[in-house]
Image: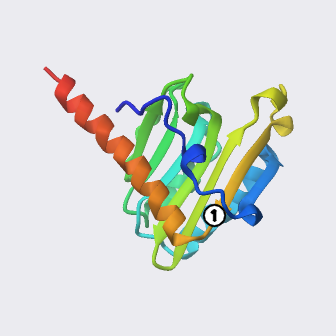
């Protein structure tokens, strides 16, 4: 699957509500993510879940969480730069490779839209302030529970994924 390297979740998210916008470290972003992951499990969300982790090298410490989420979710899409061998998984988890120079490789995102729980987390790493130590990485982001914002973003991402599948089908021999 090929996602347009110019495509960005962060760029398309409605940022018209200043109370949803934040600037934080990767440590705090991890806490936001863990809260969303726990809510997905608590609500037994049977909808698709979309997660951008920048690089698949970041997968090892969180794969068990996503296996647990995949027990309830319709499917879990994990987006990342393929920089390690990906595990073989029996659960409905689909790895979506992204290019190292793509916008999504600079983003951390989670999307879920379920009747009982809707959430969007979208954050972009600020390259000028990126430090060598992970704790020093700075992200600007948006957190929203507004169903329209979440659905519009999922629609745009799904469209990208659909375009990628159509391109792959046309390129097959």
- Along the viewing direction, whichever of 38 and 159 lies nearer the viewer: 159
> Residue at 42% of width from left, 50% of height from top?
156
Where residue 93 appears, as percent x and y from the top left, is 41, 49
Where is the C terminus found, in terms of image quarters? top left
Where residue 120 appears, as percent x and y from the top left, is 58, 60
Query: Which picture quadrant has residue 83?
Result: top right
- Residue 112 position (above or below residue 77): below
For mark 1, give the secondary structure: helix
Count of all numbered marks drawn on residues in the image: 1
119 displayed left or right of 90? right
- Along the viewing direction, whichever of 136 and 127 lies nearer the viewer: 127
> Residue at 41% of width from left, 38% of height from top?
88
Q: Residue furthest top?
A: 173
> Residue at 85% of width from left, 39% of height from top?
135
- Residue 20 position (above or below residue 100): below
Where is the N terminus found, in terms of image quarters? top left
Q: Residue furthest bottom?
A: 116
What is the image's colouring?
rainbow
167 displayed left or right of 69? left
Query: Which picture quadrant has residue 126?
Result: top right
- Residue 122 position (above or below residue 72): above
- Along the viewing direction, whichever of 80 and 8 lies nearer the viewer: 8
Q: Residues within 10 Å of mark 1 (few under 14, many from 20)?
A: many
Q: Residue furthest front?
A: 16
- Residue 85 position (above or below residue 19): above
Where residue 164 appears, as percent x and y from the top left, is 32, 35
Where residue 100 appears, as percent x and y from the top left, is 55, 23
Q: Which residue is mark 1?
A: 36
């Amino acid at each position: 699957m090929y996602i347009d390297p110019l495509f960005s979740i962060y760029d398309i998210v409605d940022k018209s509500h200043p109370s949803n916008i934040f600037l934080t470290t990767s440590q705090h972003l991890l806490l936001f993510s863990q809260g969303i992951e726990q809510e997905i499990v608590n609500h037994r969300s049977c909808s698709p879940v979309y997660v951008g982790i920048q690089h698949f090298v970041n997968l090892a410490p969180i794969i068990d969480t996503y296996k647990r989420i995949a027990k309830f979710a319709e499917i879990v899409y994990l987006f990342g730069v393929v920089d390690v061998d990906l595990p073989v998984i029996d659960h409905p988890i689909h790895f979506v490779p992204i290019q190292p120079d793509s916008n999504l490789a600079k983003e951390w995102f989670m999307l879920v839209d379920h009747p009982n729980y809707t959430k969007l987390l979208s954050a972009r790493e600020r390259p000028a302030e990126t430090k060598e130590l992970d704790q020093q990485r700075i992200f600007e982001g948006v957190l929203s529970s507004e169903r329209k914002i979440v659905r519009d973003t999922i629609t745009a991402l799904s469209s990208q994924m659909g375009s990628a599948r159509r391109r792959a089908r046309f390129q097959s021999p």
